[in-house]
Image: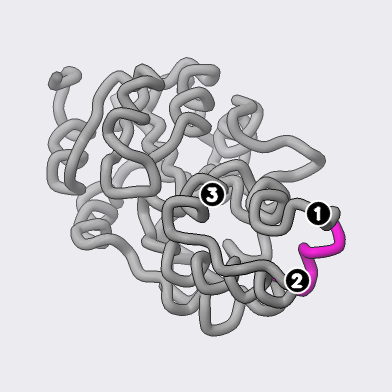
Amino acid sequence: MPAQPVYFDLDGTLVDTFPGLFAAVNWLRVAHGLGEADAAQVRGWIGGGIDALLSGAVPHVDPSRLREPFLEHYVGAPLLSSRPYDGIEALLDALASRPLAIVTNKHAQSVERLIEHLGWGDRFAAIVCPHDNVRKPDPEMVERARETARIDRADGWFVGDSSFDIETGRGARLRTIAVTWGFRTRDELLSCGPDVVVDSPAELLQILTADRIVS
């Protein structure tokens, strides 16, 4: 039987986008007369999509008015400062023979630019971003990835760094893996009830290539 598919979150799971997001959020706050937010605040706003991020950053302005200027700024130098976490390229190389997909709440414009910057266009059979108000934790995101990638099996793994990811995977009846190198603490991740928590891409690879869940 072919290897199980793996559905990945993007920010905080495959790629460290925090430095660029942190800089862009504080650029936006200063532009609207607010002081700079600290790292913990910005981390707390990430994960629910661009409108959730913007609502946290500048709460007195409708996020629809902030989206365009923020994206114009972010897709330049801040986005291009993003890098894969150590060990992720090797992980993706090792999993290249199986169906891989990205399921993210990141805005499509940013995702397209980031994937191009990283040279990852051929690594994934599907890349699914929010569309028609459908976003994680709606399991429809996984179904769209299955359809795009022509994945005909319902099992697999969902890998991410937030409650949105664990809820999405669980809703899609996938086994879930939480990674600790992203935007949430281990305790926050454990409270979401993932099947497995891992501390490194090497440990993640061991889980994904094993025949059983290792606790």
Instruction: Give the Cα distance between marks 2 and 1.
Output: 9 Å
Asked whether 49 or 94 is in front, the reply is: 49
Residue 47 picture location, percent across and down: 54, 44
Task: Say few, some or many: other residues with alpha carbon within 10 Å of mark 3 (under 14 / 14 to 19 / 20 or more).
Answer: many
Left or right: residue 146 compared with residue 51: left
Tell me which amino acid carries mark 2: His
Tell me which amino acid carries mark 3: Ile
Task: Say few, some or many: other residues with alpha carbon within 10 Å of mark 1 (under 14 / 14 to 19 / 20 or more).
Answer: few
- Magenta includes 113? no
Q: Residue at left 73%, top 35%?
A: 134
Residue 68 picture location, percent across and down: 79, 69
Asked whether 191 or 84 is in front, the reply is: 191
Tag 3 or tag 1, which sits nearer the N-term?
3
Q: Which residues are magenta?
A: 64-70
Tell me which amino acid carries mark 1: His
Residue 128 picture location, percent across and down: 60, 46
Prevailing SS of the magenta stretch: helix
Q: Secondary structure at mark 1?
A: loop
- The C terminus lies in quadrant: top left
Asked whether 63 or 68 is in front, the reply is: 63
Q: Residue at left 20%, top 39%?
A: 204
Above or below for 119 versus 41:
below
The residue carrying mark 2 is 32
Q: Secondary structure at mark 3?
A: loop
Task: Say few, some or many: other residues with alpha carbon within 10 Å of mark 2 (under 14 / 14 to 19 / 20 or more).
Answer: few
The residue carrying mark 3 is 46
Asked whether 147 or 115 is in front, the reply is: 115
Q: Residue at left 18%, top 31%?
A: 207
Instruction: Give the Cα distance between marks 2 and 3.
Output: 19 Å
Instruction: Give the Cα distance between marks 1 and 3.
Output: 18 Å
